């Protein structure tokens, strides 16, 4: 770019860009006005430089106009992809949305605000899985006798079966027999892989974990 073109860019193009962007260009994600001014200035400089290289005449107002149109459509000096989830054009077309990890998504059981970052770092199962398991458990418990319910509640509360055996006038070996019988009944009702399912990581995190592993592999390949 010649000094004359650089002077036009500085004195006539940049003031137009600074005057239009705050009121005519939508900010996307974490963008600010100063960032868009710098980005649009670079695109205007490319337009002027290309015109000068090809020997074509272009006015500063036209260079500013087309650079601003590029910026409004979501184009940036670093690229204009409509598929990149972080791209401005993708977000302007409502194909993706970026959310802050500090965004409030709800309230917890104590009424405290629940942030998006807290949800993603939570290792608990999603509410739908817990609700389905609770329904299955309630249906299973409804078909048990009072003695079997008492045995299960005793195990859940972490109490010894010897106390329950004394209250029901049974010996401990009989209580252990019923405990093993209930274990087989639960396994038959819930499925043989119930223990594996209980120890498995939440399914809703599969996509997040896959993305993290993919990025980690890319970093390792770049470092080799």
Image (cartoon, rainbow, N blue to C red):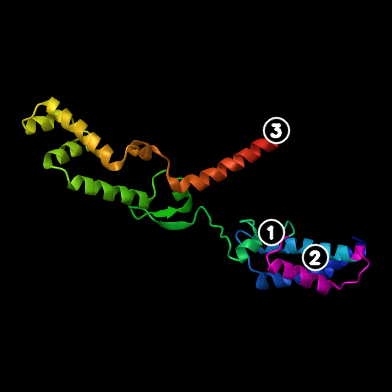
Q: Which residue is mark 3?
A: 224
First of labels 2, 1 by sequence position: 2
Residue depicted at x 16% and y 43%: 144
**Label 1, residues with CA under 10 Å away: few <14, some 14-19, many ≥20:** some
Q: Is residue 21 above or below residue 131?
A: below
Q: Is residue 197 above or below residue 81?
A: above
First of labels 3, 1 by sequence position: 1
Whole-percent x, y for residue 196 in the image: 37, 36
Element type at marker 1?
A: loop
Q: Nearer the viewer, residue 63 or 3?
A: 63
Whole-percent x, y for residue 110 in the image: 33, 52
Q: Nearer the viewer, mark 3 or mark 2?
A: 3
Q: CA distance from mark 3 to mark 1?
A: 29 Å
Q: For residue 74: magenta?
A: yes
Whole-percent x, y for residue 56 in the image: 91, 69
**Label 3, residues with CA under 10 Å away: few <14, some 14-19, many ≥20:** few
Q: Residue 72 has which mark?
A: none
Q: Nearer the viewer, residue 212 or 140?
A: 140
* Discs 3, 1 touching: Cβ within 8 Å: no
Residue depicted at x 39% and y 44%: 124
Q: Residue 81 has which mark?
A: 1
Residue depicted at x 17% and y 36%: 151
- Point out the stretch of residues depicted in magenta: 52-76
Element type at marker 2?
A: helix
Residue 223: quadrant of the picture: top right
């Amino acid at each position: 770019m010649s000094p004359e073109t650089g002077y036009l860019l500085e004195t006539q193009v940049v003031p137009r860009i600074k005057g239009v962007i705050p009121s005519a260009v939508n900010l996307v994600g974490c963008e600010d006005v100063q960032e868009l001014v710098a980005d649009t200035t670079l695109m205007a400089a490319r337009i002027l430089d290309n015109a000068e290289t090809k020997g074509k005449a272009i006015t500063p107002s036209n260079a500013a106009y087309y650079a601003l149109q590029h910026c409004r459509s979501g184009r940036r000096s670093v690229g204009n992809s409509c598929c990149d989830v972080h791209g401005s054009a993708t977000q302007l077309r409502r194909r993706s949305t970026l959310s802050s990890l500090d965004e409030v998504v709800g309230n917890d059981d104590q009424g405290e605000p629940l942030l998006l970052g807290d949800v993603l770092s939570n290792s608990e199962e999603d509410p739908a899985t817990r609700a389905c398991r609770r329904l299955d458990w309630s249906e299973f418990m409804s078909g048990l006798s009072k003695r079997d319910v008492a045995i299960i509640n005793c195990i859940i509360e972490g109490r010894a079966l010897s106390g329950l055996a004394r209250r029901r006038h049974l010996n401990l070996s009989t209580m252990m027999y019923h405990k093993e019988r209930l274990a087989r009944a639960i396994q038959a009702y819930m499925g043989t892989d119930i223990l594996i399912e209980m120890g498995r990581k939440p399914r809703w995190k599969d996509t997040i974990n896959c993305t993290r592993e993919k990025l980690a592999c890319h970093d390792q390949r770049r470092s080799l």
